Amino acid sequence: MKKVLLCLTAALLFANLFAQDTLTGNYWTDGTACNVPKHRWELGLFTASRYGISNGVEISAHPLMFFLMPQVKVKIGWGVYSGFRLATEHGIFYPTVAMRLVAAKGTGGLISPEYTIPQMFAVSNRLLASFSPFKKALLTGHAGISFAVKFGPLNPQSTIDLPVIYPRLAVFYNEPEFDAGIDFRGQFIPRIGWLFNMENFIVCGTENNYFLENKAVIAYTSKKETLRIEAGGKLCFGKYPYGPQWHLLPVIDLVFGIGR
């Protein structure tokens, strides 16, 4: 009897997913091949904010970090081919100011002040492909490459050996850096959804060359698409200079939507 009830419950949930409209909207789709509509703002508290320049082009940056560690990305949508929506993402990352600020002794010092941080920036390019495996769900695969330009030597002992931060700065110590992963999101019920994101980073030129980030969150979206609340966790693995380490970090974010 229990098996029958489980089968019926699973069938109802499966049918409910297929009974809903396909996830074709372009709201809250950072990390996918979809673009926000023209003139729409999505302002994140802890994540990058986005603006739709046109229906096929968007620009993103983190407003709170822009003057310390600016990273600007442009995503270009190339249309739908054989059911797959394609886009490319191109970015530039300038960490010099922030790294110099934390190159100090005492509280807040993450880098020894004996090391000189040169002017440098990284350029990244990524290809994204999204499709709907079933209704109210969107699956995205992505792959990209980053390389750095430095105007002076950077001591390999000046790394910031922290999760999330280290993989994104590793390109300045060993280049190029490749990334690949998936993004899988959908809805349980109207306004309540889920998101699973996996990122893999592979750094060339070093034995400490692999990093993994798995993020899983539950998200609430307001009826008028003006607010999104995400809460969950991020599991990180990395081969740091001091050895391999696992970290489990909390994830919470508020994203405000303005415009259609």
Image (cartoon, rainbow, N blue to C red):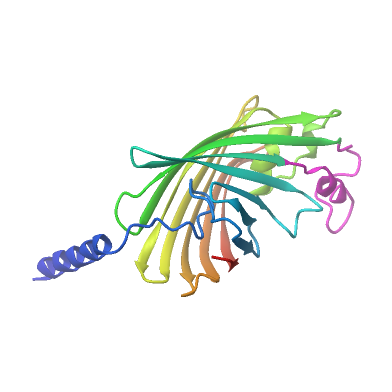
Q: Nearer the viewer, residue 85 or 171?
A: 85
Q: Residue at x 55, y 71 (%)?
A: 226
Q: Quadrant of residue 251 in the image?
A: bottom right
Name the spot of residue 91 as percent of width and height, x first.
Answer: 66, 40
Residue 13 painted magenta: no
Q: Residue furthest left?
A: 1
Return the residue found at the far bottom.
223
Q: Is residue 105 magenta?
A: yes
Q: Looking at the image, which is closer to me, 205 or 225?
A: 225
Classified by dominant secondary structure, the portion drawn in magenta counts as: loop
The picture quadrant where one finds residue 52 is bottom right
Quarter holding the C terminus is bottom right
Residue drawn at (76%, 53%) of the image: 66
- Residue 4: where, in percent of width, then height? 10, 67
Image coordinates of residue 230 in percent, x first then y, are 52, 66
Which residues are drawn in magenta? 93-117
Residue 224 as seen in the image, left or right of residue 108: left
Residue 9 locus on image (x, y percent) = 19, 68
